[in-house]
Amino acid sequence: MQAIRTEGLNKLYGRVRALDGLNLTVEEGTVFGFLGPNGAGKTTTIRILTGLARASGGQAWVMNTPVGIGQREVARHIGYLPEEPTFYAWMTPPELLGYVADTFGLSGSDKRARCEELLNLVGLAEARKRRIGGFSRGMRQRLGFAQSLVNRPQVLFLDEPVSALDPAGRKEVLDLIAGLRGQCTVFMSTHILADVERVCDSVGIIA
């Protein structure tokens, strides 16, 4: 089954053509690397697929649901980590994850268990009482990874998830991504070929 499909996807910003007839397919349960240089249209593609931007032309589907037309249904089944996640600095990790859980309708013991599970997954359990404003870039990235998984997404979109991290931070996040293989479909944009070779099952290159 195809988790993601686009046909002739276009995006114009004034006279600038950010996407020009993009066709791609991503199989369910795989880690897909969307590879290309800065400015090639990777972020634009992700923003369209997640419903944060509208295409100027063409069509796209996520889990067989048309993007745009069925966006409410799409939003329930996806997770998203932007390139530079931002959070309320005064929150603690459990407060942030609890807030995200509320938006997806999780409550009670399921909410508490899911937040605890994710804090352990990303290695932030010991930092649960610290304010996010004091986190390093790597810690914020791992927290962003956790919040993108709160609703147990079928498709996870990651926009340059390791580009600004040091080698240790990159390894941690890449290991987390590799661990999701088979649990959900991962759509990871990057311009770093070595990262794609390390964790991805298939690759699409955008010029």
Image: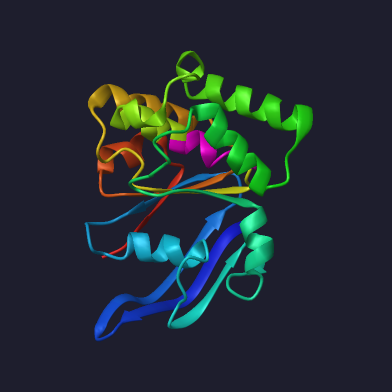
Please report the residue visible at 28 percent of the width from the left and 79 percent of the height from the top. Answer: 17
Residue extending farthest front: 90
Left or right position of 153 against 87 = right
Q: Which residues are magenta?
A: 144-152
Percent across and percent down for residue 71 are 62, 67
Considering the image in quadrants, where does the N terminus appear? bottom right
Quarter assignment of residue 40: bottom left
In the depicted structure, whether residue 95 falls above or below residue 25: above
Quarter assignment of residue 170: top left
In the depicted structure, whether residue 122 falls above or below residue 198: above
Q: How is the image coloured?
A: rainbow
Please report the residue visible at 43 percent of the width from the left and 60 percent of the height from the top. Answer: 46
Left or right position of 149 against 201 = right
> Does the magenta run of residues contain 127?
no
Percent across and percent down for residue 164 are 24, 38
Please report the residue visible at 46 percent of the width from the left and 42 percent of the height from the top. Answer: 201
Pick whichever, 75 or 103, lies toward us: 103
> Does the magenta run of residues contain 150?
yes
Residue extending farthest top: 126
- How many callouts does the rendering have? 0
Considering the image in quadrants, where does the C terminus appear? bottom left
